[in-house]
């Protein structure tokens, strides 16, 4: 990845000096895969992006269809304050609307929040979503990495993080909860200890909760409203199955929200996306069904994958991180074989810090029939690999 890594600090913390602009790698590149492998997209199943296979709630689709044919609506700019969506989110999250900032995906808020805080240094819990190193680098911010340990199932040790905050007093710290790519959840009581310490070390804590809809009781949104030191980022992409619409939001103190918004372009979200998103978040029956369904399918998939010899990490989200057996092809080869043999796309995790050894892949939890197809395809490739030895 063109990164020179220097271990400067005691223990497991390192300061990273990227040599060149990082090229982020993401899942969900189904069109590119279809082109590269000469396949049609409808013959592919995408397990590489963690999108709810239920798709957007029906009432969001109906609103989208209605607004898409409303000539008057289309001839006006969006409401620059996104009042309807912010009020809908505020009601669901029990926070004031003034604490919510809307953007074109939570990814847009990563850069906006970093520019708002403008830190000289950031403590980044790794492996992390690729846009964090990229945005930190773009803001010329020094990165200090705190790696999670595969041997400890990528569980965040709150004491280790608290020690690092106390020792280095970084102006900013970023972590993702539930963690991507492992799905490990740091429970609220531990997060509250981290929040408390960040206040004392004067660290702005950014908690990416892109997958928190799957563990809604653990969110820190109400704490974020009260604190000048905590920003929570959320996404509608994953849980509401709407990556194409590009809607995310931040929850922070109203004062911080008023500054974050200045770092975004005006009208970052289209009228159509904002109104569909407002419908989606109000559909509590959809949320309930999605939670039940993903928990059920995750349990099934995790158990089925365990029987074919891959190590499955515990996950609170709608994806599973897998460590491949030593007899398996590398993650890159396995991904290619799964595409050509079965039309199944998985996320090769080599681009994640600490997972570059070619032994890790990540798979989304999808519908039962699709999950069965994934297990069959993996069993076939891994079984063949085991016999070949
Ligand atoms: C941890 C994390 N944060 C943020 C995002 C960006 O999501 P959005 O589609 O809302 O921009 C992703 C997307 O994969 C993610 O994994």
Image (cartoon, grey):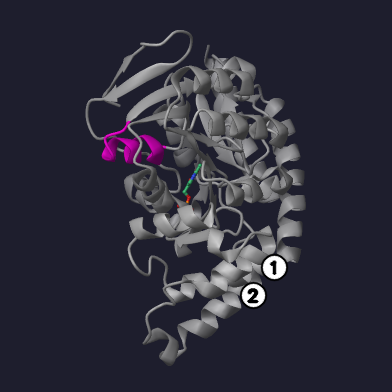
Over which residues does the magenta segment extend? 130-141
Q: Is residue 361 magenta?
A: no
- Rendering coords of residue 204 (x, y %): 47, 38
- Rendering coords of residue 100 (x, y %): 53, 60
Q: Is residue 140 magenta?
A: yes
- Residue for point 36% across, 87% down: 75
Q: Residues within 10 Å of mark 2 (few under 14, many from 20)?
A: some
Look at the numbered disc 2 and give the secondary structure of its residue: helix
- Residue for point 45% across, 24% down: 169
The answer for how far apart the CA atoms under marks 2 and 1 are is 8 Å
Residue that protrudes farthest toward the left in the picture: 20
- Residue for point 36% across, 19% down: 15
Contact? badges 2 and 1 (CB < 8 Å) = yes
Of the 4 image quadrants, the one containing the N terminus is top left
Q: Residues within 10 Å of mark 1 (few under 14, many from 20)?
A: some
Sequence-earlier tag: 2 or 1? 2
- Rendering coords of residue 114 (x, y %): 38, 43
Residue 209: name its quadrant: top right
Does residue 147 show up? no
Lateral position of residue 50 relative to residue 331, left or right: right
Lateral position of residue 347 relative to residue 32, left or right: right
- Residue for point 65% across, 27% down: 312
Does residue 92 show up? yes
Residue at the disc numbered 1: 283
Residue at the disc numbered 2: 59
């Amino acid at each position: 990845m063109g990164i020179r890594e220097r271990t400067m600090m005691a223990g497991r913390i390192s300061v990273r000096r990227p040599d060149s602009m990082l090229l982020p790698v993401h899942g969900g590149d189904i069109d590119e895969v279809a082109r590269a492998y000469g396949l049609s997209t409808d013959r592919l199943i995408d397990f590489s992006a963690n999108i709810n296979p239920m798709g957007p709630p029906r009432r969001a689709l109906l609103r989208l269809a209605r607004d898409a044919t409303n000539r008057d609506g289309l001839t006006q700019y969006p409401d620059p304050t996104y009042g309807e969506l912010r009020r809908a989110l505020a009601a669901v999250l029990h926070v004031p609307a003034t604490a919510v900032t809307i953007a074109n995906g939570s990814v847009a808020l990563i850069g906006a929040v970093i520019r708002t805080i403008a830190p000289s240094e950031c403590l980044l819990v790794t492996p992390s979503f690729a846009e964090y190193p990229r945005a930190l680098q773009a803001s010329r911010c020094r990165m200090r990495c705190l790696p999670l340990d595969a041997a400890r199932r990528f569980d965040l040790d709150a004491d280790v993080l608290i020690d690092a905050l106390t020792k280095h007093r970084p102006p900013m710290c970023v972590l993702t909860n539930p963690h991507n790519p492992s799905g490990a959840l740091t429970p609220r009581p531990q997060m509250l200890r981290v929040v408390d310490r960040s206040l004392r070390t004067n660290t702005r804590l950014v908690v990416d909760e892109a997958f928190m809809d799957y563990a809604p009781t653990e969110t820190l949104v109400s704490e974020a409203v009260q604190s000048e030191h905590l920003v929570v980022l959320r996404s509608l992409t994953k849980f509401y199955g709407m990556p194409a619409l590009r809607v995310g939001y931040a929850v922070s103190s109203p004062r911080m929200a008023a500054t974050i918004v200045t770092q975004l372009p005006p009208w970052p979200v289209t009228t159509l996306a904002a109104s569909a998103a407002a419908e989606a978040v109000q559909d509590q029956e959809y949320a309930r069904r999605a939670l039940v369904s993903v928990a059920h399918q995750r349990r099934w998939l995790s158990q089925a994958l365990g029987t074919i010899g891959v190590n499955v990490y515990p996950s609170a989200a709608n994806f599973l991180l897998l460590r491949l057996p030593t007899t398996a092809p590398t993650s890159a080869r396995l991904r290619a074989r799964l595409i050509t043999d079965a039309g199944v796309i998985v996320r090769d995790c080599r681009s994640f810090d600490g997972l570059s050894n070619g032994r890790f892949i990540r798979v989304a939890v999808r519908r039962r029939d699709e999950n069965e197809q994934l297990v069959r395809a993996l069993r076939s490739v891994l079984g063949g690999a085991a016999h070949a030895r």
